[in-house]
């Protein structure tokens, strides 16, 4: 029995060591495979036309982020101020920059924290701004259905991102390259 326990311990110690290397890489892969293009496409819908669209968001951007306020001003974006413009632009840029940082593994912990905040704000906007309160869209935890867009799916998103906050980007990342470079003694 002792030999069996030792074999078990050795095997799962190896799995644990491999997991420390593979889990962050796997989490970044899952994020890239499922959410990278989702967020980039969402960001593209918020950009205005032409080059200057990078600085002038579309009306769709305002309708996604400030739906009730936009309706209240009769869909006249000129009624919005600097605050709304800054929030829309920050959200738009975040949809491009944070996912890219996560995928390449640069400032991964901070980018993942930022994405967790983004998912929370996105979910609250969906519920309170867009009124996504029907059971099918909202979902519910601890029920027998796992297909709710907001509570069920986004919980998985946040879990993957939280793993990256805790573990970092892993060995195959720009973070690791920078860390290894910093650890090398300076050559004189």
Image (cartoon, rainbow, N blue to C red):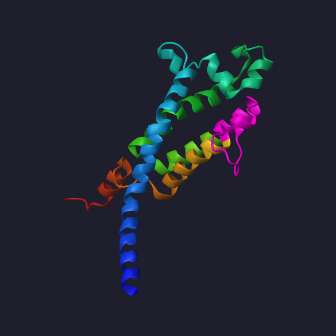
Q: Quadrant of residue 20?
A: bottom left
Residue found at the far right of this picture = 72
Instruction: Please indicate whether residue 73 sits to the left or right of residue 166 in the image.
Output: right
Q: Is residue 168 visible?
A: yes
Number of residue marks: 0
Instruction: Please indicate whether residue 129 sits to the left or right of residue 18 in the image.
Output: right
Query: Toward the viewer: 83 or 119?
Result: 119
Q: Is residue 37 magenta?
A: no
Give the position of the C terminus as an image quadrant.
bottom left
Examine the rendered structure and indicate whether residue 123 appears above or below residue 9.
above
Place of residue 41 in the rendered image (x, y in percent of width and height, measured from the top left): 51, 26
Query: Toward the viewer: 54 or 70?
Result: 70
Place of residue 80 in the rendered image (x, y in percent of width and height, measured from the top left): 72, 20
Examine the rendered structure and indicate whether residue 50 appears above or below residue 171.
above
Examine the rendered structure and indicate whether residue 163 appears above or below residue 117.
below
Say which residue appears at 59% left-offset and 45% top-offset.
Answer: 116
Place of residue 148 in the rendered image (x, y in percent of width and height, measured from the top left): 66, 39
Place of residue 128 in the rendered image (x, y in percent of width and height, measured from the top left): 76, 34
Say which residue appears at 65% left-offset and 42% top-offset.
Answer: 120
Give the position of the N terminus as an image quadrant.
bottom left
Q: Is residue 126 magenta?
A: yes
- The boundaries of the magenta stretch are 121-150
Q: Is residue 169 visible?
A: no
Residue found at the far left of this picture = 188
């Amino acid at each position: 029995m002792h030999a069996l326990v030792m074999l078990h311990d050795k095997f799962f110690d190896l799995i644990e060591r491999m997991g420390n290397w593979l889990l962050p890489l796997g989490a970044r892969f899952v994020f890239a495979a499922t959410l990278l293009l989702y967020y980039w496409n969402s960001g593209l819908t918020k950009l205005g036309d032409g080059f200057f669209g990078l600085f002038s968001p579309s009306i769709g951007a305002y309708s996604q982020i400030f739906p009730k306020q936009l309706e209240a001003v009769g869909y006249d974006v000129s009624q919005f101020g600097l605050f709304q413009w800054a929030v829309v632009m920050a959200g738009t840029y975040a949809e491009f920059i944070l996912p890219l940082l996560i995928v390449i593994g640069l400032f991964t912990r901070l980018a993942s924290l930022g994405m967790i905040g983004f998912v929370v704000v996105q979910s609250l906007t969906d519920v309170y701004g867009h009124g996504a309160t029907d059971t099918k869209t909202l979902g519910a935890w601890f029920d027998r259905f796992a297909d709710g867009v907001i509570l069920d799916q986004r919980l998985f998103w946040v879990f993957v991102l939280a793993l990256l906050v805790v573990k970092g980007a892993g060995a195959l990342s720009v973070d690791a390259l920078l860390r290894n470079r910093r650890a090398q003694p300076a050559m004189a």
